[in-house]
Image (cartoon, rainbow, N blue to C red):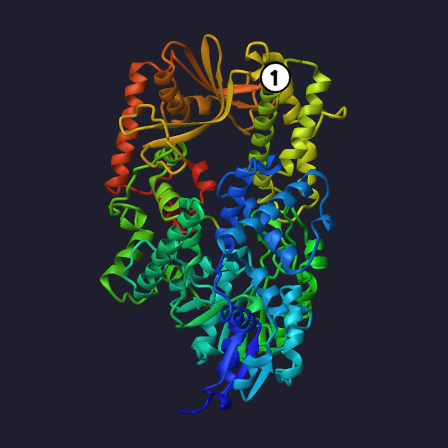
Amino acid sequence: MQSSLSQTLYISYSNQKARDIKNFTAKALDRVITLDTLILELFESKHFETIIDTTIGTSIIYKIIQTQKIHYFDYLEEGALSLQTIYDFLIKCKRNEVAFEKLHSGEKLEALRVIDRAYETYKTTHNLVDIADIEKSVYENWDNSFMEKYKSVILDSFKIGGISYIESLYQERILQKIIPSSTPIKRTATASTPAKLIKPSNEVFDNIDEVKTALRITRRLLEEGLNSEEILIVASDIQEYVPLYKLFLDEYGLKGYSSIGTPLSFFHTIENRQVQTALSQYKSKIAQLTALYKKLGLTLTQSTKDALKSSFTILDEKIGVEMTEPNQIVGLTQSYKHIIFIGTDINHFPPKASDNFLYGYDDALSYFYANNYFTSSQTQIEELKRLTENLYIITASYSGKRELTPSILISSEYDETVDVSSVKSLTELALENKTVIPDTQTQEYYKSIAGTELTKYDGLNVDGVEAAHLSASQINKYISCPLAYLYSNKVKVRAPNQDEEGLDVMEQGSLMHLCYEHFGRYIKDNHIKSTNREELYEIMYKISIEAYNHENTLKNRAEENIHHQIFLSSLQAGLKDDRNLGLLAKFVEYYIEQAPKLNYFQDTEFEKEFALDGNLQPYVLKDKEDTSYFIRGFIDRFDNIETHINVIDYKSKKISTVTGKDTKTQEKIDTLKNVQLALYLLFTKQQYRDKKHYASMLSFKGESKAAHFGVLDDKGFDSDYEDKLKSIIYSTKQSMESGKFGFDNSDEKMCEWCDIKYICHQNVLNKS
């Protein structure tokens, strides 16, 4: 047996680079590990504490906030992303010896101090350690003896161009301990000739077209005799582009894989051996966590289990052309004859800086060893050029209706263009009757594309999909188009990510809802019975600022820009100036007029949760984990006043008529093509039998001050209407579970905004 003294130890910064060293630099028996792994091994060789990760740490933070009654953060629910932000902040500060007061003051600072003290006590009590404890311990108790069993220790370069792979102050200190006893790795050679920059001759429309163009180039190169190993596709935003890449591979008769794999949660069957292995590992991890959480007195929620399942990834079989991301190629030895770079507009590359409510991008640069997005992206471009002879740059022209600009990091001078207009997809060839039909199943598929009859490819006769839990929006979706429901709610297909410079329509609506809700809660909780316009305007103005900085808004606003501020300002119009009243001022005017009738919101619930059982009777949910309901939902505003119940659903729909009515919406409510208000009243009429009931969709956007543009009351909700509603609900459930998901494009507006239109046959040939 060969002695370990003949081994060389390589210490690198990432698993990707470690694999590269194993393949191109190290000898067969040499050992290659990352710095993270080395630090962990050195710690575990002398310590026996339980090591906790972000999942456990976040649960501990939630428990502390609840038990310590920390008012500043008590609005956070279990599983909220902001809990992870708090934990991440505590760890970052400790790994980098950053005092909280450098970044915060006042009530927030004191709340963080209380959490931190309780967290440190909790760890000591339960014999726990986190990554900050591990790094600090290894540094303070540094021992070089582990190096003595190796012939030599070679340390990778942790700084390449504008990118540093050092993650913390303690990591840097540990590296300084290693350097005197190690040898620096030989730098990877630079290409002898500069890479040829190439762009497609055709205009590339959007991100779908970017992927298709990349696949056309790939197809052409393979037809010219290249091997797939000589081609690499690099995507600036791999999470956005990988689903599209995998979706269109078959269209061009190609094989491919991604460096990030596929989350375990995406798989619905376990026939694949890799999926079985990952599922087994996931179940084992859940069993371990269940025991540990019980020991620590923590609650392991379903949302935590789901998040953990998504973190387990199945690596793709390495067949065909790989898609990876720019940061994965930095410092590598392997080179490629052709690299195709997609997502090179200014919105994608360099990536946008991200902030959160505890620290911003500038703070991360100053204190937490973050890399500058711009300079690190410059390095990535230079590395792409170093690793290839031919670099193809593909930039989309549009994102939705918004025109895009090429990244300022991309040269406007190209050496040549490539024409791939002659490379056709299988669908294009099939429509031109130019394909060779390989088998019966494929022939059926091609026929379905051009045929007028609906087939299984349009959602007919799908194996039954369980419909144990439904909501009003899901039922409405199915009624509008069963195929859209199948893909959006069960298969979980989403439209390709189209980043807007500001908040998109859904995000604008969410911010508007949050302002209405928080204003109502503030009025109720503080027992305010004033209808003084100036006072209420001031309250709404402050509420709008809080809602704009609320965690639910922040998570949709990675980087604040002028477009976000303009939208907030438009909402606030009239509250502190003489502009025409915006939506928030209109809401206040509506409240002033209705306040006495509504008892100043004292009898109102906001975001009222309701549930119905399998018999469509009101069901009381036992807790957040209770799944014994059939239908569940939330009512924006629920006025339980003296003689009647008001059920209000806020909408951001623009109502163009002065009357405030919308004929099409009302018709859908009356004919049960939209069951939202009907479900609300089905619950309300049973739960509050001795009162009158009124439900409406309420908008403040339009010519009238407040438009109840879709309404339903006891007169409209008679016994026949109720019977028809129940029949629709049960027949919808039965249709879902019997596999009826046929394509239905009867609502053209539905198709226009549909998430699945880019894969639905409606996009190829209309079927009526």
x, y percentage for residue 83? Answer: 55, 45
Closer to us: 183 or 125: 125
x, y percentage for residue 601? Answer: 56, 17
Q: Residue at x 29, y 33 (%)?
A: 732
Question: Mark 1 = which residue?
Answer: 527
Query: In the current view of this chain or complex, which residue is farthest to the front?
Result: 125
502 in relation to 88, above or below = above
Q: Quadrant of the N terminus?
A: bottom left
x, y percentage for residue 380? Answer: 63, 69
Q: How many marks are shown on the rendered structure?
A: 1
Question: Quarter-wise, where is residue 205 in the image?
Answer: bottom right
310 in relation to 599, above or below = below
Question: Quarter-wise, where is residue 489 in the image?
Answer: top left
Q: Left or right: 747 with respect to 143?
A: left
Closer to us: 671 or 727: 727
Can residue 197 be seen here? The reply is no
Q: Quadrant of the C terminus?
A: top left
Closer to us: 715 or 7: 7
684 in relation to 691, above or below = below
